[in-house]
Image (spheres, rainbow, N blue to C red):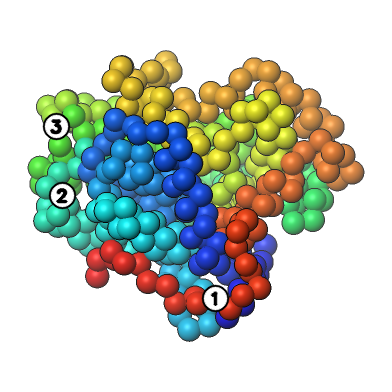
Amino acid sequence: MIIEPRMRGFICLTSHPDGCAQNVKNQIEYVKSKGAINGPKKVLVIGASTGFGLASRITAAFGSDAATIGVFFEKAPSEGKTASPGWYNSAAFEKEAHAAGLYAKSINGDAFSKEIKEKTLALIKTDLGQVDLIIYSLASPVRKHPDTEFLHRSVLKPIGAPFSNKTVDFHTGNVSTVTIEPANEEDIANTVAVMGGEDWAMWIDALKAENLLANGATTVAYSYIGPALTEAVYRKGTIGRAKDDLEATAFKIGDQLKDINGQAYVSVNKALVTQASSAIPVIPLYISLLYKVMKAEGIHEGTIEQIQRLYADRLYTGKPIPTDDKGRIRIDDWEMREDVQAQVAKLWEEATTETLPTIGDLPGYRSDFLSLFGFEIDQVDYQKDTNEMVEIEGLVS
């Protein structure tokens, strides 16, 4: 079939298997070009199919020859209907990993559930024995609690008062003002239940109970802080409460791992175009301005550049891992440079529908968004007939 992007609001309903595959190959080539990392050898990535999770799996495998197990929840293809992009990403990753002689298997299902945890533990026990790095990179709007079976839904809302500021429709380039009503206590609790640290802790508890954590094992979860421009809706909003919980959980897990000389960290990463960030008001405008500034400064990074730097310059240098005063790894350091933020704040004041094409990088934003789904990737012929029925070689049933 000929596969084209089909949009509905902030979601692309189709994905391109060849485009996703090329995107994965490009990330692999970048990691290989940066040289070997004296890093992990047996890695579990929870949330492994897109974004930072996919980049983490690629960097572990092709940066330090690691065996990897990826857990994700993706839609398989059916005749005439494409899979979700994470499915095609994972299929491409496994194909490349196996061709390179690397162990790679995947589990598709709800990572919040007891069933998927048990299946993952059984696979580690059988195939790897133990893991030395656990990446936690889940991004889901809902979570069915494994104990209560209550369905928690996260919300993107400020706390305490309505929030009004600029935003942009990245499809049309129209800059407007958006107002978001504040969350109630139930909204906050549900968002923390979905995006906080409870499930991360459950994974580590389960792995440790079965003696599946190697001596010196490290676990890392991903977070974001961002600038004053976005803090009312992000870091001081419902998501921020969840991230506070995630960061507090890192200390609890770290204490739990002391007997095996293990460590737990939250890595604060850079603002990037993801399916999740595209749905957050204000963020697309901020990212389009940030891209313009960081590209001009020569310090722009995508997910793979961020994670390769996290592994090579922070986690696996052989030296103590540098953290901020709250124990977090700051790989958002280039984004949060004072000169970068000063430039973005100035552009924010100037941003209108008319000025944005000049002062922002909306084409870069759109291109990055479409590339998430395998579109607008160089070296891909989008006019050719493409087989949507792609299998994941190492998928564990």
Classify residue 94 as left or right of residue 362: left
Classify residue 225 as left or right of residue 382: left
**Image quadrant assignment for residue 311:** top left
Amino acid type indicated by mark 3? Asn
Kindly identify which numbered label has been placed on residue 386. 1
**Image quadrant assignment for residue 123:** bottom left
Classify residue 21 as left or right of residue 263: right
Q: CA distance from mark 1 to mark 2?
A: 36 Å
Amino acid type indicated by mark 2? Leu
Q: Which residue is mark 2?
A: 128
Crowd tier of the residue under label 3, counting other residues whose Cα lies within 10 Å: few below 14, some 14–19, many 20 or above: some
Q: Which residue is mark 3?
A: 215
Q: Position of residue 81 (x, y in %)?
A: 52, 78
For marks 2 and 3, the one nearer the N-term is 2
Crowd tier of the residue under label 2, counting other residues whose Cα lies within 10 Å: few below 14, some 14–19, many 20 or above: some
Q: CA distance from mark 1 to mark 3?
A: 46 Å
Kindly identify which numbered label has been placed on residue 129. none
Q: Classify mark 3: helix, strand or loop.
A: strand
Q: CA distance from mark 2 to mark 3?
A: 14 Å
Q: Position of residue 314 (x, y in %)?
A: 38, 25
